[in-house]
Amino acid sequence: MEHEQFDTETLKLIKNRLDYIHFIAKRYNSDNPELMDTIESLATVANMFARIKLEELSGKVETKSPQGYIVSRLGNSYSRMKEYEKQKDKGFPDWKL
């Protein structure tokens, strides 16, 4: 049998910290919207992973179709990071298609 690498109390702590990060990113969104939206999306994705693992450990699956939710939320952060990279890459053409 495989040894479990997570315990319930640590996962609850992780979820709590991710909730806090999410809250702060939403609260201060007007300071830097692109950055805060990215942080919020990443915290949401990580929180979903933690929630799924908690459900797995408890034997109670409550979250339906988490993969689609995670992929969609991750898409937001990925797109923002790609745009940021383009802005920082001096060799990237200024024109858009």
Image: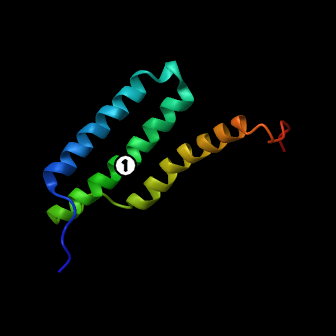
- Judged from the image, the secondary structure of the residue bearing numbered disc 1 is helix
- Give the percent coordinates (x, y) of residue 3: 18, 72
Residue farthest to the bottom, as pictured: 1
- Give the percent coordinates (x, y) of residue 34: 56, 31
> What residue is at 34 percent from the left and 51 percent from the top?
48
Does residue 6 lie above or below 12 as drawn? Answer: below
Does residue 9 lie above or below 30 as drawn? Answer: below
**10 Å crowding of disc 1: few (<14), some (14-19), many (20+):** some
Q: Quadrant of the C terminus?
A: top right
| Residue of label 1 | 46
User: How many numbered marks are there?
Assistant: 1
**Residue 60 appears in the rendering:** no
Q: Quadrant of the N terminus?
A: bottom left
- Give the percent coordinates (x, y) of residue 58: 15, 62
> What residue is at 66 percent from the left and 41 percent from the top?
85
Q: Which image quadrant for residue 95?
A: top right
Does residue 68 lie above or below 45 as drawn? Answer: below
